[in-house]
Image (spheres, rainbow, N blue to C red):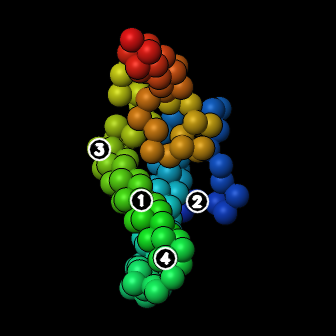
């Protein structure tokens, strides 16, 4: 097995269904994609903390201005919380990649389609298993 980062990807490489599933190039492609995504989220989070949250003046004399500032602040905090959870999922995906479990459905053990992984690199369920899961959730919610 190739060591992490030792596989050099061609610049235009895109994984396809026609190649061996989770071969070293495909693994490296998803590893780089996940790391870049995580870095982008962390950079955005740092910028928000530096610019928005530290400089937000919630004690404005005008009630409408204060309400608007508080709403913006709350929205920013919710966004950061969602991103924190997303970073956790990215880290788990990177761990699965290291353990050769990445790309396989947690429910069925079958490979998750390359297209699904490319669109949602943190996916843990195949499309079919995800749809089944969502149908069950909807059924229980409607009860």
Q: Nearer the viewer, mark 1 or mark 3?
A: 1
Instruction: Describe the element under mark 3 as helix, strand or loop.
Output: loop
Residue 92 position, x and y percent, is 32, 49
- The numbered mark at residue 67 is none
- Marks 1/2 in contact by CB < 8 Å: the verdict is no
In this image, 29 relative to 12: left or right? left
Q: Which residue is mark 2?
A: 9
User: At 46% from the left edge and 38% from the top edge, which residue is drawn?
Assistant: 123
Q: Earlier in the sequence, mark 4 or mark 1?
A: 4
| Image vertical order of residue 48 relative to residue 6, above or below | below
Q: Earlier in the sequence, mark 1 or mark 2?
A: 2
User: At 64% from the left edge and 60% from the top edge, which residue is drawn?
Assistant: 10
Packing grade of label 2 (10 A; few <14, some 14-19, many >=20) is some
Residue 40 position, x and y percent, is 50, 69
Residue 50 position, x and y percent, is 42, 85
User: At 53% from the left edge and 25% from the top edge, which residue is drawn?
Assistant: 127
Q: Which residue is mark 1?
A: 78
Q: Nearer the viewer, residue 142 or 33?
A: 142
| Image vertical order of residue 84 relative to residue 125, above or below | below
Q: Nearer the viewer, mark 1 or mark 2?
A: 1
Q: Which residue is mark 4?
A: 63
- The numbered mark at residue 99 is 3
Instruction: Describe the element under mark 4 as helix, strand or loop.
Output: helix
Q: Nearer the viewer, mark 4 or mark 1?
A: 4
- Marks 4/3: CA distance? 54 Å
Counting the numbered discs, the total is 4
Instruction: Describe the element under mark 2 as helix, strand or loop.
Output: loop
- Marks 1/2: CA distance? 36 Å
């Amino acid at each position: 097995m190739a060591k992490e980062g030792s596989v050099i990807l061609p610049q235009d490489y895109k994984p396809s269904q026609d190649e061996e599933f989770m071969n070293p190039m495909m693994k490296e492609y998803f590893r780089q994609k996940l790391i870049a995504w995580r870095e982008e989220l962390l950079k955005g989070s740092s910028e928000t903390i530096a610019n928005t949250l530290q400089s937000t003046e919630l004690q404005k004399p005008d009630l409408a201005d204060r309400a608007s500032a508080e709403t913006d602040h709350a929205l920013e905090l919710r966004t950061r919380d969602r991103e924190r959870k997303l970073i956790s999922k990215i880290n788990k995906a990177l761990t699965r990649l290291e353990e050769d479990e990445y790309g396989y459905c947690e429910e069925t053990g079958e490979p998750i389609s390359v297209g699904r992984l490319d669109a949602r690199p943190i996916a843990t369920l195949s499309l079919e298993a995800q749809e089944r899961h969502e149908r069950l959730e909807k059924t229980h919610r409607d009860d």
